[in-house]
Amino acid sequence: MLFRPSTFVALGLAAVAAASNVVELTPKNFAEHVGGKDPALVEFFAPWCGHCKNLAPTYEQLADAFAGSKGKRQVVIAKVDADGEGKSLGQKYGVQGFPTLKWFPANGGDPVDYEGGRDLDSLASYVTKHSGVKSSIKPPPPPAAAQVSAANFKQVVLDPNVDALVEFYAPWCGHCKRLAPIYEEVAKTFENEKGVVVAQVDADAAANKDLAREYGITSFPTIKFFPAGEPKAPIVYEKPRTEEAFINFLNEHAGTHRVAGGGLSDLAGRIPSLDELAALVRTQAPTELLTRAQSVAASLSSDLTKRASALNDTATKFYLRAFAKAAEAPEWLDKERVRLAKLLEGGKVTGTKLDEIKVKTNILKAFEEVKEVKEAAEEVKEAAEEVKEKVREEL
């Protein structure tokens, strides 16, 4: 038996239709599905309607989310062609535009117009709220940005040991919505930075309006930086609202070295005063350098210790360890550099451990650079000796 291509197309469309969890209603079966023991959300649509076509895939997802296990549906997600076979239903329920969505309570209650958003989360939240039925949609992960209110603002933002970047926003604000994904990426970048908080305040919420007035918030979004140790004197953020600009601003004002994605730059952990000693490790007595390094480490500024203390503590200790190891066995520097490089290349290390390895790798570069300079100097010296020897021979 032969099938034409059109036959396969028809069979494919039929299979898709059969797989849909959206109930197709007509005047004949409307009472069977709506007004009974299960509540229903009904879309009155027209096949030619562009907005209806845009809604269609989301509506399918909504129906799938409330399909129930093993076909035990507790809420009906349905649609009516109100410009075709179901035109009389559209007229009965006062449909004047497409798409129109109406909520029909269980047991024959009066229908209610749905006036919320047409995205999946808004639709699903509405259905859950009015039916008590939970959808199968997995909730989104909690935001990386700290969600702050008047109740915890002092503890989170005004902590004298942290630098805080705070966005004062309003849920309805278009600029805030456009900024949201960018700001979230910035928060993710600084997740492992214990001395930095990237936070948000719904400044339009009734409970937070006094807080907004206290900090002079008159438009949305307003972004302010609260410096560690001086939280009562916030700085208004007036740079571009790009991920790169936010990261650069925080690095400059908080003394951090983050890069987009959450990693550390090649400057993280480097301490100039100890780098100067590292430059001498292959030319001066290692034990003497270790003593000098210990003295420098002990006298580092209190500000360095206060900011990002965990990371700087790791850096200082590793500098001292590198000096000590160099005194015992100079080849340790090269072996450790190779070991750390393999860990980074493996891709299995994450979070604070990854930061620690990056800092150590950066510090070893101070010793690496010294080696390269020394090798270049040796080459110059050897070349000079060769010239002298040739001159002697010529004489």
Image: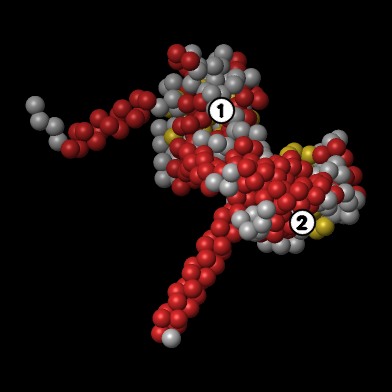
As shown in the figure, which amino acid type bears the numbered disc 1? Lys
Q: Position of residue 393 (x, y in %)?
A: 41, 81
Quadrant where the image shows the N terminus: top left
Q: Residue furthest left?
A: 1
- Mark found first going from the N terminus, 1 or 2: 1
Label 1 and label 2: CA atoms lie apart by 38 Å
Q: How many marks?
A: 2
Q: Position of residue 135 (x, y in %)?
A: 56, 24
Q: Is residue 274 visible?
A: yes
Q: Residue at x 45, y 15 (%)?
A: 71
In-front residue for pair 173/127: 173
In-front residue for pair 390/167: 390
Q: Position of residue 347 (x, y in %)?
A: 49, 39
Q: Residue at x 85, y 37 (%)?
A: 155
Q: Is residue 244 visible?
A: no
Q: Position of residue 174 (x, y in %)?
A: 67, 52
Quadrant where the image shows the C terminus: bottom left
Mark nearest the camera among 1 and 2 is 2
Mark 1: give few (<14), some (14-19) or many (20+) Cα within 10 Å: few
Image check: 390 left or right of 286? left
Mark 2: give few (<14), some (14-19) or many (20+) Cα within 10 Å: few
Q: Residue at x 60, y 19 (%)?
A: 133
In-front residue for pair 28/339: 339
As shown in the figure, which amino acid type bears the numbered disc 2? His
Q: Are marks 1 and 2 in contact (CB under 8 Å)?
A: no
Secondary structure at numbered mark 2: helix
Secondary structure at numbered mark 1: loop
Q: Residue at x 46, y 47 (%)?
A: 50
Task: Identify the residue position indicated by label 1 in the image.
Answer: 138
Task: Identify the residue position indicated by label 2 in the image.
Answer: 253
In-front residue for pair 339/49: 339
